[in-house]
Amino acid sequence: MALLVELLDHASRGSGRVVVALVAVGFILNILFWSTKYRTVSGSPVAGRKWWFEPLIFTRYRFLLNGWAVTRAGWDQYGDRIFTIARPDSTITVVPPRYLDELQNLPDTKLNGIQALAEDMGDEYSGISILKDTHLTFNVVRNKLTPKMPAIITPLLEELEDALKLELPDSKEWVAVDLGTIITRIVSRLTTRVWVGKELSRNDAWHTDNIRTTENIFITAILLRFVPPVLHPIVGALLPTRRRIRKGIQKVQSYLVPLIEKRRRRQAELGTVAEEEDDVLQWLMDGASEEESGAENLAERYVYSVIGSLYTVSGALTDCLFDLAEHAEHVEPLRQELRQVMAESGGKWERGTAAKLVKMDSFMKESLRTNAPSPFSQKRIVKEELRLSDGVKLPAGAYVCMIDQSAIGRGPDKFDGFRYAGMRQDPGFMTKYQYTSTDRDHLTFGHGRLACPGRFVASLEMKMVLAAMLERYEVSFHPSGKGGVRPQKIQLLELAFHNPATRVYLRQRTKE
Ligand code: HEM
């Protein structure tokens, strides 16, 4: 945590020794050892290059410090054609959204999504390469967890109740809190409950170990992006975070390996899976290939698989709560909808409750539209040369992606939390504008064959947490409960983080 906070804190001030030193070292190494991992479409223009003769090294480091602005400039200048983004570690290719339909469902042998994800996230140096060449987690989340959503409502609510008591302030006065960290811990508990059960969801050390390991994976991935790929074996070997990841994995294995072995022994005795063990870990165990099924391998796989669930949901939830604080006019209508929906089910959260929270769904979608975690979507490695419908060729070995237009502010300017609720009143658009729906203008969950399989669970968990927060707390950026300024996110490369120094004020509501 300390290293992440340090890195982000320095980055947020735009100077600081850490970022300046890293940029300087990366810059020199890049001049000396430049190499690129990915091929590009010949003749495609480079986004953010100030003059045609500007050495590309400057464009690369402009992207590192100002990636969102470079992407925006690329979109504005070349949006409807193929262009490239020069990252410090490689050059990637941006294809326009008109190719979405023909690219979205191509098989892994032609366009590989998990390879692009792994290579962006530090590959073998962070250890995430263990996920390459397998769809185990994807299949488990899509085919097992999502259909089981009605069954996880009760355990999630029980876990949430306990987590709120532990993590949130018990005060009727305004109290300053680090909401991002609190929400990460709450989401870690919810995720653990659904993935491995109650024994670990109530284990504080488990959450700390998991969260720290995930942070070290992120830091390793980010730091490697500062230097050219030819140096990754050397820099990767020297990074202290890499050793910390190994230690973290060993800790997670020390919890999960005995659990997996215990389950296997019990299942051998009973000849069946106990009801309380019907969870994500069990489905991973059941679906694993021979090579994946060793207890240590499964435990390691768990760490990398859960990242997609933990950080995305906690980031999106924190944004929703910040949006509630900033656009407080939405709070009462959201509470009113919640009261009405809960009254219809006698105060109980039922199978259909989440779907009835149309205003909340809309608020979450608007929050995701205006706070997308990255301007890029549909990231893929081209495995064999592709000829597109208009004759353009994407070479094998290219990294291609699309721009999520809303992420770079090319959607409506104003935040309107009920925009999508309004659009859904037209019966033709009832489902098109749900939080979990994806299309060319809403790519934050991806789109097509590989679209995020966990978005339905994400939506359910987020609605539960938001409902609890609306019922029990007021949120503000100012200790008086009014006004205050929402801090800017920290942007580095194509990533955006909450500033860890951000404090939000919470106050318990008096019961209605
Ligand atoms: C707001 C929350 C979330 C966001 C914004 C998000 C976003 C994404 C995106 C952009 C992708 C890549 C899609 C593509 O390549 O086309 C993805 C993939 C994935 N997500 Fe999510 N996600 C979220 C929550 C979750 C949750 C809660 C889970 C698990 C329960 C999950 C599990 C996965 C998995 C397994 C993949 C596939 C990785 C692979 O290709 O194997 N996500 N997600």
Image (cartoon, rainbow, N blue to C red):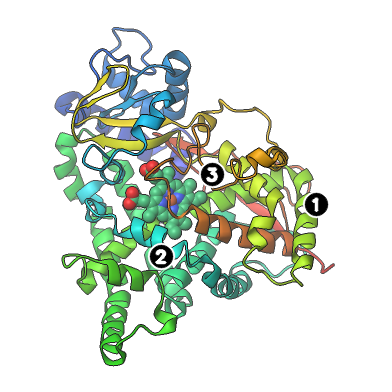
* Percent position of residue 201, x then y: 47, 74
In the rendered image, which residue does mark 2 sit on? 144
- Amino acid tagged 1: Glu
- Amino acid tagged 3: Ser
Tell me what residue is drawn at x 34 percent, y 19 percent: 83
Q: Is residue 413 visible?
A: yes
* Above or below 64: residue 219: below
In the rendered image, which residue does mark 1 sit on? 332
For the C terminus, the quadrant is: bottom right
* Above or below 186: residue 124: above
Mark 3 or mark 1, which is nearer the start of the sequence?
Answer: 1
Which label belongs to residue 11?
none
Q: Is mark 3 within 8 Å of ligand 1?
A: no
Q: Residues within 10 Å of mark 1 (few under 14, many from 20)?
A: few
Eye-nearest disc, 1 or 3: 3
Q: CA distance from mark 1 to mark 3?
A: 26 Å
Q: Residues within 10 Å of mark 2 (few under 14, many from 20)?
A: some
Q: CA distance from mark 3 to mark 2?
A: 20 Å
Which label belongs to residue 437?
3
Tell me what residue is drawn at x 42 percent, y 19 percent: 74
Q: Residues within 10 Å of mark 3 (few under 14, many from 20)?
A: some
* Percent position of residue 208, x then y: 42, 67
Callout 3–callout 2 Cβ contact below 8 Å: no
- Amino acid tagged 2: Lys
Q: Is residue 3 visible?
A: no
Label 1 secondary element: helix
Relative to 244, 469 lies left or right: right
- How many marks can you see? 3
Mark 2 or mark 3, which is nearer the start of the sequence?
Answer: 2
Q: Is mark 1 within 8 Å of ligand 1?
A: no
The foreground one among 112 and 125 is 112
